Every structure is written in structure tokens, then in C-alpha cells.
Amino acid sequence: MFCNMRTLVGDLRSNMVRYRQINLGEVKTEEMEKRNIYKRETQPFRPRHPLINQGATCYLSSILQVLFMTPEIHHRLNPSNTLDQQLELTFNNLKEGSCGTENITDSLGIKNVYQQRDAAECLERILNEVSPEASQVFKGQLKDTTRCSNGHMIIEETSPFFTLPLSLQGGHEAPCSLKTSFSEFFLRTEHTGDDMVYCTECSRKTEGSSGYEMVDFPQIMTLLLKRFYFDFNTMSDMKSNCCVEVPFKIQAMNKSYTLYGMVNHMGSLGGGHYTATVWSRENNTWYHCDDAQVTEVHRDQKWSNRSLEAMRRTGPVLHICSCTELQRGGSRSSSKRRTNPNPTNKDSGGVPSSSVLLCLAAFYLWCLLSYF
């Protein structure tokens, strides 16, 4: 009996050791898988090769070059989704050499490749048509709230967004800062006088405030500079030519976003040309992608150690950033100027959209779209 008990205890200990080894192995396997996912998400790329312009598809080429430099989405592309499949094919071709974009325009249903289009609209369209897994890294959540002066909640709505539209602060000619525009997007609007709001709990119109709170920060944030506006003096759409100072890093609560790409536009509301400027983590170098040319950007070309400033009284329009930590958080502030964060861009017949509809942003580290 005593021998049997010793044998039983020995077997039990052996089983416990094996059980712990198995579980430890599963933990190690899980940790290794997480590390592999991280390595796939952050695998560095370098934009070595250009994309061939089909006619007037510079808007698409610029967006694709930025997405190519966003490895966070590459492993998320779903082969069962047609657009995901074609994006993966294009990215693989870009690693080997120059390639066309006919497969992408076919997937997006673009028939007339000689019609100029808006890059912001193109980006939104791609993110809406790819698989949810791929677009998830660009998606955040904004809460739109309106409260009366007594603290009663009048409106509380949460909606997803891919891009944040930023107004140019300081007028249409004076230099401005992207940091300031970003902060003022989250300032609350005060409703007083004729603009008072009706509160059902107070049963009357009262003073109040409204604004946005970011309740879910995207891993890749896209910022849009709204350079076009309607001038009531001339009763026509105009473009702001002010300089915009763009920092390499932006803080949003406890999140830090780093600039990694820009989509630039040169021209007017009626037409123009798009290019992309992207950062390669592979060799810590910026590259300028202009259809058939990909060239290295040297530091003496409009660059400084702390910030990027658009010269010739111009500034970037689309900024793309990537978050260094992916915890959720919220900002207690909202927009001073109530702007729909997800407007529907109309094709202007040229490249950029109008001021109100021009809503690009920044993805990945954070990218900048600029209209010259």
C-alpha cells in the first residue's frame, strides 16, 4: 500500500511537470506568435520603385506609395477580398520593380483614368472597400456631445472615422501650425444668444457647449488640412496659400504619433498634380514619389530636425501618423468649429475637394497631404 502511494505521488508529480511544460510551451508559442505579428507589422520597407501613371492617376499612385510604406496593414490583407488581393499583388510587384495600377482602378470601378480626382476621396474609398481587418488600423472613434449649461446631456453620438479634417488657424495668408489646428479641433463650441440649445430636462433653451472627444485612438491617424474655402466677397471657391509648420511628432493624450508620410498637391481647385513623400524605417530616409520617379530627399530640401515646413507660402494637406502605443484613451475636448469628421467628398473635376469637403488626414506614423 505504501509503495503504491509512493508510485501514485511520483506519477502525479510527473504529470504536473508535463502539464506545466505543456502550458509553458503554449505560452512561449503564444508569445512567439505575438512577436512574429509585431515583426510582420513593423517590417521596414523602402520605396525603391515608382508606379506608372495611367493618364491622370497621380492621386492613386501617391496614396498607394503611402500604403506600401504602411506595413501594419500588409499582413491584414484578406485574399478573399478582391481589393485586398489586388493591393497585395501591387505591393509585391513594387518590391521587385516599377508596376502599373490597372488592377487597382479595375477593382475600384474607375473607368476614366484621364479624369483627375481627389486623393482624400480615393483614400476613403479604399479604406471603405478593403476588408475590415485591413482598414481597422486606420479607424478611430469620435464622440459628439452637446451639454446644456446645467450639465444635462442633450446629444451623445459616437461614430467611426478614418480622417480628421483640420481648419487652418490664423487666417488664409498668415503662417499657422498643424499642432494648433489639431488642438483646436477638440475645443468645445459655446452656444449662447441666438445659438442656444434646447434642453428637454430644463424644458427650455439654455446656453450650452458641444464638441468632439476621441474615445478610440487609431493606430494610424490621418489628418486633413482644409486649404479650400468659399469666399463670400468673390462668391467663389478659393485656396489658402499660407505656410503650415508640421512637427514630426504629435501628442494626443498618452499617445505619441510620428510623421511618416505626406501626400502633396500642386495646383488649384480646377486641377493639378499629386506626389507623395514617405519615410523609410529601413534606412531612416525620406523619399519623394512622383509617378515615374522615386528620389531621396536630402535634409537641406525644406527639412529641419524638429519640423517640416511647407515653403513658397504653401502647406501639406494630408498627414499620416502612426501611434507608438495602442492603449485606449479619451480626450475631454472638442472642436471649436463644428466640422463633420466624415464628409462626403465630391469630385471637383480637378484634384482637390472644396474647403468643407476636403477631409484628408494622416495614417501610419503620420502622413501629410499638401496642396501647393
Image: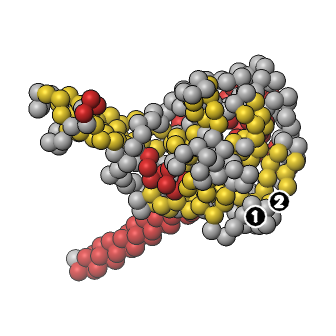
Residue 134 relative to residue 69: left or right: left
**Farthest front residue in view:** 233
Please name whichever residue, 56 or 188, is drawn nearer the observer in this view of the structure: 188
**In the picture, which quadrant includes the N terminus?**
bottom left
> Percent x, y for residue 346?
61, 23
**Residue at coordinates 14% horizontally, 42% vertically from top-left?**
150
- Can residue 1 be seen here? The reply is yes
Alpha carbon of mark 2 to alpha carbon of mark 1: how far?
7 Å
Amino acid type shown at disc 1: Thr
Instruction: Tell me whether circle 2 and circle 1 mark residues in contact (CB < 8 Å).
Output: yes
Q: Secondary structure at mark 1?
A: strand
Quarter where residue 211 is shown: top left
Above or below — where is 83 with respect to 280? above
* Disc number placed over residue 285 in the picture, else none: 1
**Residue at coordinates 54% horizontally, 45% vertically from top-left?**
171
Residue 136 relative to residue 64: left or right: left
Quarter where residue 77 is shown: top right
Give the colouring mode of the picture.
secondary structure
Residue 112 relative to residue 152: left or right: right
Please name whichever residue, 218 or 186, is drawn nearer the observer in this view of the structure: 186
Amino acid type shown at disc 2: Glu
**Farthest top residue in view:** 111
**Residue at coordinates 46% horizontally, 64% vertically from top-left?**
27
> Percent x, y for residue 300?
79, 66
Q: Secondary structure at mark 2?
A: strand
**Residue at coordinates 41% horizontally, 36% vertically from top-left?**
338
Q: Give the residue number, with chain letter if any, for mark 2.
A: 296
